[in-house]
Amino acid sequence: MNDYKRGEFLVETEWLANHLDDPKVRIFDCTTHLVPDPDKVFRVESGLADYQAGHIPGAGYLDLQADLSDPAGTYRFTTPGPEAFAAALGAKGLGDDYRVVLYSTAAVSWATRIWWMLYAYGFENAAILNGGWQKWQAEGRAVSTDDCTYSPATFMPSHQPGRIIDRDAVLAALGDDHAVVVNALTKAQHEGTSKAHYGRPGGITGSVCLPALDLVAGDNTFLTSSELEAKFAETGIGMDQRVLTYCGGGVAATVDSFALTLLGHDDVGIYDASLSEWANDDSLPMTAAGLVKG
């Protein structure tokens, strides 16, 4: 057991090991990679090869870019509409009748991204594997290289307004004392001193920065509830505020949003297009506090 207010959204490796043969539990590897590319900042690579090299026994694979992003979207990782999302998940065997466990062999953000889309469409029977693949391997638990295909399932989406938001919602929040906009990228990216940016360096003017990487411990598990509460408080993020998170493309932002949800905060949204949109529109305000003009 854990002491998070919404602790059902996180499961431990021991629990999963004891439920590998449970027909009502379906496990999915969500790995994707962002590879540095001088022409695109980052290039998306599927994690299918990682899955084929070794995964938790019985786990299927979800490809965020190929299967769960809108192919007509202007920006990569754009959340698909409810019908397309439901059809893609149902075909993979993710449905309303199952307890779903998500993990990644890379950053936890790939799992929380898919978790957040499920949450935005009203599915609350999914959990993140605490510590992910890294902890599973470190504990010497069983590994499989067999492909797993679940039988199709029925996923009935129920859109939850405000959990995935657009630039207009961010602009409105910037002038609202009861809301806070949070950058989940690194502090160097937020301050504009990193070479990696999405069109313009820096962060959205008026936003604060709490890097997604600061919310997980060295063993890839989430910080305890008291540690998370301290991180948010230190950053000036109140549990009574509307919180909107962003990053480069709506992935890292879901770590901050997921952590807030673990703590029981139910007024959180992610800016889906994030800086992929914002940084490429000069009419939208950005600040690079770390850049000193000569």
Image: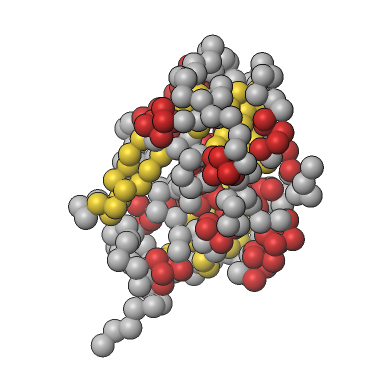
Image position, residue 287 (x, y; %): 39, 72
The quarter of the image holding the C terminus is bottom left
Residue 57 lies in quadrant:
top right
Q: Position of residue 62 (x, y in %)?
A: 46, 29
Q: Quadrant of the N terminus?
A: top right
Q: Residue at x 63, y 52 (%)?
A: 222
Left or right: 144 with respect to 286? right
Residue at 67% of width from left, 31% of height from top? 16
Query: Can I make out residue 161 in this image?
Result: no
What coloring was used for the rendering?
A: secondary structure
Q: For this rendering, which residue is in front, 278 or 215?
A: 215
Residue at the image point whose x is 60% and y is 38% from the top: 140
Q: Along the horizontal axis of the image, is 1 left or right of 41?
A: right
Which residue is at 41% across, 39% downward? 32
Residue 178 position (above or below residue 147): below
Q: How many marks?
A: 0
Looking at the image, the residue that sits furthest to the top is 151
Tell me if residue 35 can be seen.
Answer: yes
Of all residues shown, which one is farthest toward the front? 140
Q: Is residue 230 left or right of residue 30?
A: right
Residue 91, placed above or below residue 282: above
Viewer-side residue, 143 vs 39: 143
| Quarter of the view holding residue 127 | top right
As drawn, the residue found furthest toward the bottom would be 294
Q: Position of residue 145 (x, y in %)?
A: 46, 24
